[in-house]
Image (cartoon, rainbow, N blue to C red):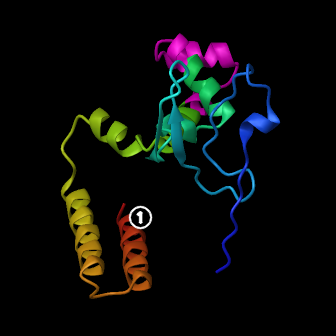
Amino acid sequence: MKLAWCYVHMSDAYPADQPRETISTCPVCEAELRVTRLQCVACATAIEGRFTVGRFSRLNREQLALLESFLRARGNLRELERELGISYPTVRNRIEALLRALDLADGAEAASATTEPSPSDRAASARRRQVLERLARREISADQAAAELAGGRREEQVGD
């Protein structure tokens, strides 16, 4: 595998007094970027290391605009529907996509669930856990685990 290194000094591209948004993906290969240096604007103290830019940096401009609108509407999806001029199902789909982009979908869905999981859901979860544990112990390959997990989903859909 060939690795390419790219060094871009952002101060060469933009005037120093013009604030810039932090980007989280490489403009060359679209891989994740890591912050490696932080510097104090007052005393020039610099800290070097490997830092992430945070969860919200994963959002594209449209998702950030949606999040801002959501906050302005104080979480009221009907108000958001009116503000954006889109249908309620579209608002819900975009909010779900936003939650997935922030890795909050599972937690949000679990937090909003008011009932206990059904026995079939518990059984399916136990099957998935067993497959992943077998994969972790290297008893099966990743391909075998994927096939077993996909087979389990098909069985669940047929049973519904």
Stretch in magenta = 70-91
SS majority, magenta: helix
Query: Toward the viewer: 80 or 27?
Result: 27
Q: Position of residue 132 (x, y in %)?
A: 29, 72
Query: Toward the viewer: 107 or 79?
Result: 107
Height in image: 66 above or below 26?
above
Q: Residue at horizontal 25%, vertical 62%?
A: 125
User: Where is mark 1, residue-wise?
Assistant: 157
Question: Residue 71 in magenta?
Answer: yes
Give amino acid for label 1: Gln
Quadrant showing the C terminus:
bottom left
Q: Secondary structure at mark 1?
A: helix
Query: Toward the viewer: 128 or 47?
Result: 47
Height in image: 100 above or below 112?
below
Q: Residue at horizontal 37%, vertical 79%?
A: 145
Q: Position of residue 63 (x, y in %)?
A: 61, 32
Question: Residue 77 in magenta?
Answer: yes
Q: Position of residue 156 (x, y in %)?
A: 36, 66
